[in-house]
Amino acid sequence: MYQNEYEWVRQTRETLLDFCRELEPNDFTRQNGFAWQNVRDSLVHIADCYYAWLGSFVLLKTNKPLTPKENLHNLNLNDIKIRFEQVDTIVYEVFKLHGNQLNEPIERKIPWRDVSEKVSFTPGKLLMHTITHEFHHKGQIVAMIRQMGYEPPYTDVIGTED
């Protein structure tokens, strides 16, 4: 499992990101009063989760994987698409470096938190977490889009190509 299934995740993400081009610019950042408040911030939050758990915890690429709130307003859809291309690179690097050891625990401190205790997770579990986290927030984004009067695309894995 994982590498083929991640392609389905990418396909559903692309469907949603492509649809976001149809949103009025004000709707992309419209405060909706739930979740991460708007479509843009929710998408960045999804990417940040991959950066944090896979890029920072598993691959030790950075100690600061999370986008500061004050920087969110500078990001547009093209910036977010580039972030997800970087997410794909991170995921593929996890497959390359840990593909045969996705169930081998990694024990270390969480790099972006000021906590001294160590935690233990397998790369496979963190990959599953980031994917389910993405789908959770993708559902919220689709709800926001519907609430604004748009008809969002079908973004379930069942609708992807094998």
Image (cartoon, rainbow, N blue to C red):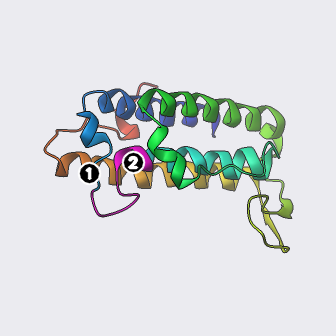
Residue 3 vertical placement versus 62 (above, below): above
Residue 98, compared with residue 103, is above or below; it is: above
| Residue found at x 50% / y 30% | 79
Q: Would residue 54 appear left or right of 111 to someone viewing this image?
A: left
User: Where does label 2 land, which residue?
Assistant: 138
Q: Which residue is mark 1?
A: 144
| Residue type pointed to by label 2 | Lys
Main SS, magenta region, reads loop
Q: Is residue 119 above or below residue 86?
A: below
Which amino acid lies under the numbered mark 1 shown in the image of this protein? Met
Residue at image position (51%, 54%) is 133
Magenta part of the protein: which range? 32-41
- Helix, strand, or loop for circle 1? helix
Q: Quadrant of the N terminus?
A: top right
Task: Where is residue 9? Give x, y as percent.
Answer: 49, 37
- Give me the residue at 57% from left, 33% from top: 83
| Quadrant in the rendering for residue 129 | bottom right
- Counting from the top left corner in percent of width and height, residue 108 is at 86, 62
Q: Residues within 10 Å of mark 2 (few under 14, many from 20)?
A: many
| Residue 40 in the figure: left or right of residue 20 | right
Mark 2 or mark 1: whose residue is earlier in sequence: 2
Q: Nearer the viewer, mark 2 or mark 1?
A: 1
Q: Is residue 92 visible?
A: yes
Q: Position of residue 11 (x, y in %)?
A: 45, 29
